[in-house]
Amino acid sequence: MVQLLGAMELAVGELAQVLGQSQPRVSRHISILCDAGLAERRREGSWVFLRAPSAPDSASPLAGAVARLLAAAEREDALFARQCEEDRRKLSAIRAAREKTAEGYFARHAEDWDELRSMHSPDGTVEGALIAALGDEPLGCLLDIGTGTGRMAELFAPRAERIVALDKSLEMLRIARAKLQHLPAESVELVQGDFLDLPFPSDHFDTILLHQVLHFAQEPALALTEASRVIKPGGRIAIVDFAAHDREELRERHAHARLGFSDTQLRQMLRAAGFRLVPPVALDEGELVVKIWVGQSAPGARSEAKKEKRA
């Protein structure tokens, strides 16, 4: 089980499927592993997902020792190595099932997404501009708020030390899991959560990304304040969203709570949240202009923002 969870995050039922064991039996062993710090359990709705400890050597001496022992056993014990390899091959069935679910979702929503995409600059242009806006500075630990299909997490995974992909929708997390399952399990974590109540400690992330997410917020200023709480001093936030527009039909067809944002609005909200904004980038190759706003969290600015909030 420990070896499999080191390869990818798995639901309890998926782990039972790979091992050919009953789910109750697997659950008993999972409880033992979790109590010992050799696995981590996370609930998403009615599903429970398991993964290897985020950092085995730092999580506990036992986790680090077991990881080294298993690696040595697989190198030196031919029978154990064959068993591990056979079980890892079974993971391909899990990956295929996830991809089938993702394909079904895309098929159901393709028409709506194509309609929205036709209104703004091509995705590749937007992604290239975002990469340029973030520059060559290290991304460190990156939080992708509203990860959706997981595309941004996939795009920046090679440049980040670690990616945490968060979404409120269980269905979208399953889609993202299918897209990101080829990445090392220890480098990507998927978390269910709300951008108004992020399930992370303060000063935790180096970079925060909100890609086409903020226009879904009824109170975007509160979302940015919560992002400010979990970002480290000196960390950066990047917001990709629409410039202010008058396409009212997007409220009903695509559940947009906000019809884009003006530079003044974003500047004021980011400043109030303790960020210093650099000049934004505009991409105007369609009816809807896409803007990229990047801000840096400054200790002084954050202190002032907290004072204003208390006042």
Image (cartoon, helix red, strand yellow):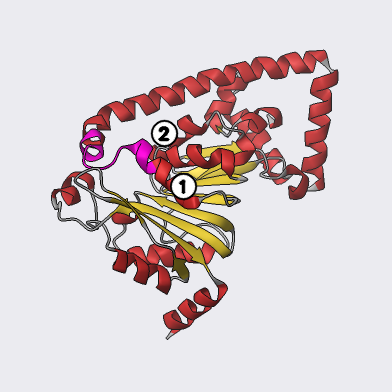
66 sits to left or right of 161: right
* Coordinates of residue 154 in the picture (x, y in percent): 49, 37
Residue 132 badge: 1
The amino acid type, in three-letter code, at marker 1 is Ala
Residue located at (43% from left, 67% from top): 225
Residue located at (26% from left, 56% from top): 243
* Coordinates of residue 17 in the picture (x, y in percent): 56, 22
60 sits to left or right of 256: right
* Coordinates of residue 306 in the picture (x, y in percent): 48, 78
Q: Nearer the viewer, residue 45 or 115?
A: 115
Residue located at (50% from left, 64% from top): 296
Specify the principal SS of the magenta part: helix
| Quarter in which the N terminus is drawn | top right
* Coordinates of residue 12 in the picture (x, y in percent): 56, 32
The amino acid type, in three-letter code, at marker 2 is Ile
Residue 241 inside the magenta-drawn segment = no
Q: Nearer the viewer, residue 127 or 29?
A: 127
Residue 175 badge: 2
